[in-house]
Image: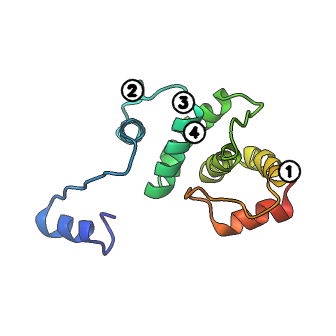
Amino acid sequence: MLQGPWKEGKTLTSAGCVEITVEDWDPEAFMILLNIIHGHMRKVPRSLDFEMLTKMAILVDYYECLEIMEFHAERWIDQLPAKRPFTNHDDPIRWLCISWVFRNGKLFKEITGDIQRSFSDRIPTLELPIPNSVLGKSIAFWG
């Protein structure tokens, strides 16, 4: 955003600074992301609940910052229950998003199997960052 041909990058180049307004993010999730990026590790929670982990996955995908988040994501995922309880029909899709964004192959394989057993029709994306190619493959190739 700051180095490309986008409005923010052009403003930064010409003015030397730019103000970026973020409105659609959960404030707590965004602060966690900023604390990690800026190295404020004491302010980073050691564990996250499922809902916050989903919000973090959305931010990581949007800002393309997986590399800096990998260590924390692995720890957060490992601290959630190994038996993934699905409290509603959307939970498997959220787990799919988390496994895809954080490149967790083991979790991805488990979740796609669950999805194959849970959905007989088209898989809803819930507007989460899951490519159509993954949705198609999760039904066709995993299980």
Compare marks 4 and 3 and give the one earlier in the sequence. Answer: 3
**Mark identifier at residue 73:** 4
Packing grade of label 2 (10 A; few <14, some 14-19, many >=20) is few
Given residues 36 and 58, the one toward you in this image is: 58
Mark 1 Cα shell of 10 Å, populated few (<14), some (14-19), many (≥20): few
Residue 33 at what x, y percent from top left?
41, 41
Q: Earlier in the sequence, mark 1 or mark 2?
A: 2
Q: Which residue is mark 2?
A: 43
Q: CA distance from mark 3 to mark 1?
A: 27 Å
| Numbered disc in front, either 4 or 3 | 3
Please determine whether, in this image, residue 48 is positioned above or below residue 14.
above
| Secondary structure at numbered mark 3 | loop
Which residue is drawn at the image coordinates 71% and 60% (left, top)? 123
Amino acid at circle 1: Arg
Residue assigned mark 1? 117
Residue beneath label 3, please? Answer: 48
Q: CA distance from mark 4 to mark 3?
A: 9 Å
- Mark closest to the chain's N terminus, 1 or 4: 4
Q: Residue at x 66, y 68 (%)?
A: 132
Q: Are marks 4 and 3 in contact (CB under 8 Å)?
A: no
**Judging from the image, what secondary structure is the residue with disc 1 in?**
helix
Residue type beneath disc 3:
Leu
Q: How far separated are the C-alphas under marks 1 and 2? A: 39 Å
Q: Residue furthest left?
A: 15
